[in-house]
Amino acid sequence: MEGDEKTKPRLEIAHVLFIDIVGYSKLLTDEQSEALQELNQIVRNTEAVREAEAAGHLIILPTGDGMALVFTGSVERPAECALEVSRALRAQPSLPVRMGIHSGPVQHVRDANTRENISGVGINIAHRVMDCGDAGHILVSKRFADDLAQHRRWQRYLHELGDVEVKHGVVVSLVNLYAETIGNPAPPACVAEVRRTAPGATTTRKGLSPVARATFIIAALLLTLAIVSVIFAPAIMRSIDKNRATSAPQPSATASPSFSDAIQNMVKQRITDELQKGLSGKSNAPTPRVAPTPGSQPTPPPRP
């Protein structure tokens, strides 16, 4: 029973720093060996690694294209190691590296070669955090950042990025660790993509084709124009009529008559002519002769 207790894996909280070389698989075999050797030398020369190894609080695990550093002592050591590595790499831009840090439970196990190894959620999440970064990034989980923020000196380094869904649907809250000459202040590509596709973003919804987007924009503009026209059309028409009334020329005495006036004058002249013609016809009609009465003398006709 006691033997079983001794061999049973024990969980403990560790602070894991993952480091890998960006674009490692694209390098030639010789270049891969040189890059790994260069990175190992930089990491081994950091003060944080030397102190942790001397205290027995560090296990370094090779990962093929980088390494995982498992610190079991101070929470600051993985962050200090990341800063030292970042400073050293600024002088060697040919070695693009990204880093990720997380604090979580781990357990000591034996691998197939009976060598000591580390497994657990702490290792897995640290790896996922690192995978979200690009060259030069030092990303840390929100859990690790909250512990680090208890020390005033680290607060200026921590810049929250938000939640990102990683492998197997796991959501991690990321914080970018950088300063003036340390780390990469630009948001990682995965975070920028999440912001573009987030619900409520100012950009067009994901899945709309260019034609659909153009149709939507035109329809919105036409609807806006219609609403503005309905609201302001009466006022605009009154303003136009007022301007026309004030700008129209006043009729003068010498102005030529309009077409309607000419018709009226023509009708009046025709009526006048007809009346005059009727009156002249009556004046030219012959005077009727009166028959003489008996005993009266006939009136001689007038001399010509």
Image (spheres, grey):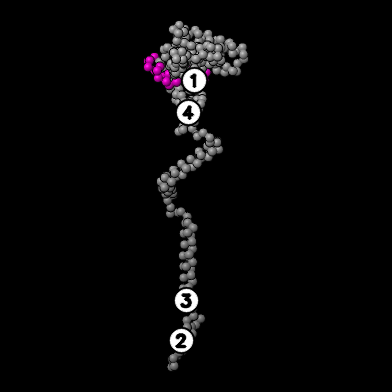
Taking 229 as reference, is 206 above or below it?
above
Residue position for label 4: 195
Taking 269 as reference, is 293 above or below it?
below
Q: How many marks?
A: 4
Give the class, few, some or many, for how many residues have Cα within 10 Å of label 3's Cα (few <14, many ≥20): few
Q: Nearer the viewer, residue 217 or 162?
A: 162
Asked if labels 1 and 2 touch by Cβ distance under 8 angstroms, the answer is no
Q: Residue furthest top?
A: 54
Secondary structure at badge 1 equals helix
Asked if labels 2 and 4 touch by Cβ distance under 8 angstroms, the answer is no
Image quadrant occupied by the N terminus: top left
Please give the name of the residue rendered at 46% of the width and 8% of the height, measured from the top-left corner: 53
Secondary structure at badge 4 equals helix
Give the class, few, some or many, for how many residues have Cα within 10 Å of label 1's Cα (few <14, many ≥20): some
Residue position for label 1: 124
Residue position for label 3: 282
**Label of residue 290 in the image:** 2
Q: What amino acid is labelled 1 in the image?
A: Asn
Residue 261 is at least partly visible in this image: yes
Q: What amino acid is labelled 4 in the image?
A: Arg
Asked if labels 3 and 1 touch by Cβ distance under 8 angstroms, the answer is no
Please give the name of the residue rendered at 42% of the width and 20% of the height, measured from the top-left corner: 143
Give the CA separation, mark 4 to mark 2: 124 Å
Extent of the magenta region: 131-153
Q: Earlier in the sequence, mark 3 or mark 2?
A: 3
Taking 61 as reference, is 187 above or below it?
below
Please give the name of the residue rendered at 49% of the width and 27% of the height, measured from the top-left corner: 169
Say which of marks 4 and 1 sits in front: 1
Report x, y in % for residue 138: 48, 17
Q: Earlier in the sequence, mark 4 or mark 3?
A: 4
**Label of residue 105 in the image:** none
Q: Earlier in the sequence, mark 1 or mark 3?
A: 1
